[in-house]
Amino acid sequence: MRTAMVSNPGRMKSDVTMNDIAEYANVSQTTVSRVINNHPGINSATRQLVLDAMQKLNYRNCVHTRVAIALCPLPEQNDPLALDCFSSIVAGIQESFNPQEFDLSLQVLPFGAEELPKPENPQGVILLAYPGEQLRSHLRERKIPYVIASTDCYTQTEDLVAVDGFNAGVAGASWLLSSGRTRFGFLLTEYDLPRYAGFQMELMRRGVQIRPEDLRLVRDSEYSSFMEEAYQWLAQGDLPEVLVISYIDISIVIRKMLMMNHIRVPEDVLIFSFSHRPRKNSEIFYASFDPRLLGRRAALRLIEKFRSPDDSPIQIMIPMLPDENERKARTLNTLS
């Protein structure tokens, strides 16, 4: 006999939760989730039991699974939603969830946050940007399914949708080598090391070595930190033939600084960078990715986890490819 207490079975269906259904049908919340999402591993008797409970509680045809989008920016990113990359990822997530089935909330967490803000109690979470291990461990302890959606976070044991920085480096190195340049320098943050690893592997494969002094890690993502490092390099009078920089907006500023110091770009120094969208009339060579696609894939992966809670974690890589339009290809060929 069912023993769950339901004070008002006829209340509005948006007030009924999956936990109410589970208690009424005397099954687990996971079983209710699997029935709602048409999971094939539920026998017909249990499925009908849950469906009967949904009908009794007026829950039919309205799921409203609570999903939290948790944005975990770097300390210097004071207004992360003003950054086009993050806002585009969020837009891709939002457009992938049916509002008749899911309730979305958006939270900007402080750097290094160890748990979600109270009274946030989601049934699933999408973590953006730079979520720390303590926050992820907190979600695992609470058995809340989550997906990491990031351009700069890497893990082999969690569900992850990330930009394929390594192969972006491989493709970028291969493309730039066609210019005949053999000395590559790097102005990167620590989060860009997978891109550097791709460059390093392809350059070594082609017999090109990177000098130790030509890898310069910038302490943070602030423009001033990049400009300081670039100025020191310029003052030493030993700039490489190709300069790879973390972000295209910073690259544009550094390009102007070099030209003010009578360094021709791209004739003397060819600049290569990374962008989250195609750029029209850009004088910078770059590789780009689609942030909305990253958001959409993260949302679809979380939906898959709702349907199949026992699925093993997977990693999904979003491609980042060099911009090889005709004008830039001609420019590159004239430099070779």
Image: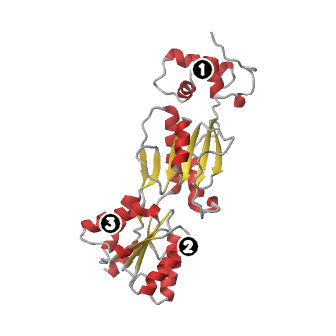
Cα separation, mark 2 vs mark 1, equals: 56 Å
Residue 2 position within the rendered picture, expressed as x and y whole percent measured from the top left: 64, 13
Q: Amino acid at mark 2?
A: Tyr
Cα separation, mark 1 vs mark 3, equals: 56 Å
Q: What residue is pinned by disc 2?
A: 223
Q: Tell which circle, 2 or 1, labels the residue nearer the N-terminal end.
A: 1
Cα separation, mark 2 vs mark 3, equals: 25 Å
Q: Tell which circle, 2 or 3, labels the residue nearer the N-terminal end.
A: 3
Residue 135 position within the rendered picture, expressed as x and y whole percent measured from the top left: 55, 46
**Viewer-proximal residue, 191 or 18?**
191
Disc number for residue 51? 1
Residue 329 in sight from this viewpoint: yes
Quarter of the image with the C terminus is: bottom left
Q: What residue is pinned by disc 3?
A: 200
Left or right of 231 on screen, residue 78: right
Disc 3 element: helix
